[in-house]
Amino acid sequence: MPAPPFQPGTHPGCGKVKEVLSRLGDKWTVLAISMLVEQPRRFNELKRLIGGISQQMLTRTLKGLERDGLVTRKVYPTIPPQVEYGLTDLGRSLALPLMQLGLWILDNINAIEAHREAHDRKAAQD
Amino acid sequence: MPAPPFQPGTHPGCGKVKEVLSRLGDKWTVLAISMLVEQPRRFNELKRLIGGISQQMLTRTLKGLERDGLVTRKVYPTIPPQVEYGLTDLGRSLALPLMQLGLWILDNINAIEAHREAHDRKAAQD
DNA sequence: CAGGATCCTCTTAGATACTG
DNA sequence: CAGTATCTAAGAGGATCCTG
């Protein structure tokens, strides 16, 4: 296991890593990125795919990703209007470690839930 | 790029992946795990290493990780009391994709910040 | 269809004080 | 030292209505 890149002093941009990490860590950002991995998507298509997100939060999330240079927003001036969101190269390069993390979760979700139940059962003995 | 493991229908535990993701994505969890990668740490040692975290949030974070079976809590009944936190095997296996993500951020933090500044500069033209 | 504007609620997180 | 308890502020997130 390599030395973690977050410890103070080990890297110059340590504080910034924390910041980006908490950006990625909001409720919807990672999900939005993952829905764009395969192909560009339209606004309501994303909303449907993600599921459970309000249009306001989807707007905010996509704006944030666009600001960070991870997502592009292409507007087709048709009627009705059509907007397509897609990953930039930067966004695609991020998707890789993100998918790895998702796969880990899938592999271990059962173990985690088993631990939780055991833990909660013990805590209920009072 | 593999199909994302988060899309509804592609995997049975899709909703649960979202949930674990948002658990990992709080402000301190990933940082706490990363500080335990190299060796077990004591409470105040963790607090100092992470930096900027309140003792309450550290307590909550560690309790959550313990509940999920990612962190062990060993109490030495000495005076003053001594408690040591360490990663379980499950926690160590999670640390791997997490460090990958951290390395990506380090590699690309400059590009992200450049995008942000350019984006904000454009937005300021109104 | 793709959002902007508003209002409201709930969670997250920080500060402080206290305890075994 | 390693927490617990309580209070509070800030922001995340949801619901609804409105518009080009």
Image (cartoon, coloured by chain):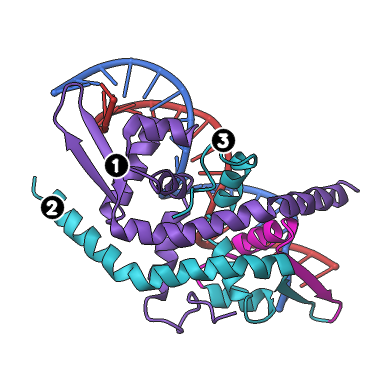
Chain colours: A cyan, B purple, C blue, D red
Please identify the quadrant where the C terminus of chain A is shown.
top left
Q: In the image, residue B36 lies at what x, y percent?
A: 38, 45
Neighbor class of circle 3 (other Cα within 10 Å; few <14, some 14-19, many 20+) is few
Question: Which element type, helix, strand or loop, lies under badge 3?
Answer: loop
Question: Which element type, helix, strand or loop, lies under badge 1?
Answer: strand
Circle nearer the N terminus (3, 2): 3
Q: Which residue is mark 2?
A: A122
Q: In the image, residue A120 lies at what x, y percent?
A: 19, 54
Side of A58 relative to B44 (left or right): right
Q: Nearer the viewer, residue D1 or C18?
A: D1
Q: Which residue is mark 3?
A: A9
Q: In the image, residue B9 lies at what x, y percent?
A: 45, 84
Amino acid type for the residue under numbered disc 2: Lys
Q: CA distance from mark 1 to mark 2?
A: 19 Å
Asked if residue B82 is positioned above or below residue A51 in the image, the reply reads above
Q: Nearer the viewer, mark 1 or mark 3?
A: 3
Q: What span is colored magenta in the figure? A: A51-78
Q: In the image, residue A23 lies at what x, y percent?
A: 59, 52
Q: Nearer the viewer, mark 1 or mark 2?
A: 1
Q: Which residue is mark 1?
A: B85
